[in-house]
Image: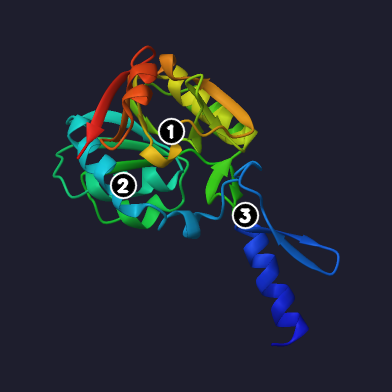
């Protein structure tokens, strides 16, 4: 393997959050270091069965002739895939996810409203103040959001201030907010707090969670468990 190829591969792994390059080589990130969210195409296939179970549980919550928000997370993308298996005579979907454009393009009775904004290729999302400003002008019936983690103090957390600002505004503008977070994200704290779970309507997670986790989370939010 040439040095150029090796450096390219190391850069890709560093971008994915697997390791950190140092002088003369690289080192694996320690488990107690912040788990920065990795590139969209890598994260999309991580714990995909758990994410799909959440999507199956959440899809029936969408009603005809409603306006919903789906965030730019990979869980949101999989939720949209599952949702679009259902038939709607009228549905408005607002999103800052470029990945949803192709998925929804051929669904003629589904209206897709894209927030606009600056393309962030790392998270594969549209971000910036443009998104917050757009969301401040719309009324949303239900928001479907995810997060990088949920801390032991029941805070939604992320590694991006941009994501935190966007999700806060989406919650503000929505009548109901459902958090889709698989069990691997429970009691996992990222660098930035988004908001308390108590601001949201329900947490949809997987059934394989510990009783003490259920007991703590029940104090803040309604729990719905996917099979």
Q: Position of residue 145 (x, y in %)?
A: 40, 33
Q: Answer left or right for 141 relative to 23.
A: left
Residues at marks 1 and 2 touching, judged by CB atoms closer than 8 Å: no
**Dot 1: few (<14), some (14–19), or many (≥20) neighbours within 10 Å?**
some
Q: Nearer the viewer, residue 90 or 159?
A: 159
Disc 3 or 1, which lies upstream in sequence? 3
Query: Cα distance, mark 2 to mark 3?
Result: 21 Å
Q: Nearer the viewer, residue 86 or 111?
A: 86
Q: Which of the 4 image quarters holds residue 164? A: top right
Residues at marks 3 and 1 touching, judged by CB atoms closer than 8 Å: no
Q: Answer left or right for 138 relative to 35.
A: left
Residue 107 drawn above or below residue 187:
below
Q: Nearer the viewer, residue 3 or 67?
A: 3
Disc 2 or 3, which lies upstream in sequence? 3
Q: Position of residue 109 (x, y in %)?
A: 20, 44
Query: Cα distance, mark 3 to mark 1?
Result: 19 Å
Element type at mark 2: helix
For disc 2, the marked residue is 50
For the point 84% across and 69% down, the residue is 24
Q: Answer left or right for 130 relative to 199.
A: right
For disc 3, the marked residue is 17
> Which quadrant holds the N terminus?
bottom right
Q: Which of the 4 image quarters holds residue 227? A: top left
- Residue 141: tell me if it is visible: no
All told, the count of numbered labels is: 3
Q: Position of residue 46 (x, y in %)?
A: 42, 55
Q: Residue furthest right?
A: 23
Element type at mark 1: loop
- Residue 40: tell me if it is visible: yes
For disc 1, the marked residue is 186
For the point 24% across and 31% down, the residue is 225
């Amino acid at each position: 393997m040439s040095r150029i190829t090796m450096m390219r591969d190391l850069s890709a792994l560093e971008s994915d959050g697997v390791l950190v390059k140092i002088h003369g080589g690289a080192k694996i990130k320690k488990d107690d270091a912040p788990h920065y969210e990795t590139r969209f195409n890598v994260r999309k296939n991580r714990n995909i069965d758990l994410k799909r179970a959440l999507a199956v549980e959440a899809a029936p919550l969408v009603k005809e002739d409603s306006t919903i928000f789906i965030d730019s997370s990979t869980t949101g993308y999989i939720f949209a895939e599952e949702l679009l298996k259902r038939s709607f005579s009228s549905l408005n979907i607002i999103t800052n996810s470029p990945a949803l454009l192709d998925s929804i393009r051929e669904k003629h009775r589904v209206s897709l409203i894209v927030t606009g904004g600056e393309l962030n290729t790392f998270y594969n999302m549209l971000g910036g103040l443009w998104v917050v400003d757009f969301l401040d002008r719309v009324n949303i019936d239900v928001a479907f959001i995810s997060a990088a983690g949920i801390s032991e103090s029941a805070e939604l957390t992320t590694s991006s201030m941009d994501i935190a600002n966007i999700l806060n505004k989406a919650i503000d503008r929505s009548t109901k907010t459902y958090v889709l977070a698989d069990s691997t994200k429970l009691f996992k704290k990222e660098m930035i707090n988004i908001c308390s779970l108590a601001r949201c309507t329900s947490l949809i997670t997987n059934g394989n969670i510990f009783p003490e986790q259920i007991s703590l989370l029940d104090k803040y939010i309604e729990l719905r468990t996917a099979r």
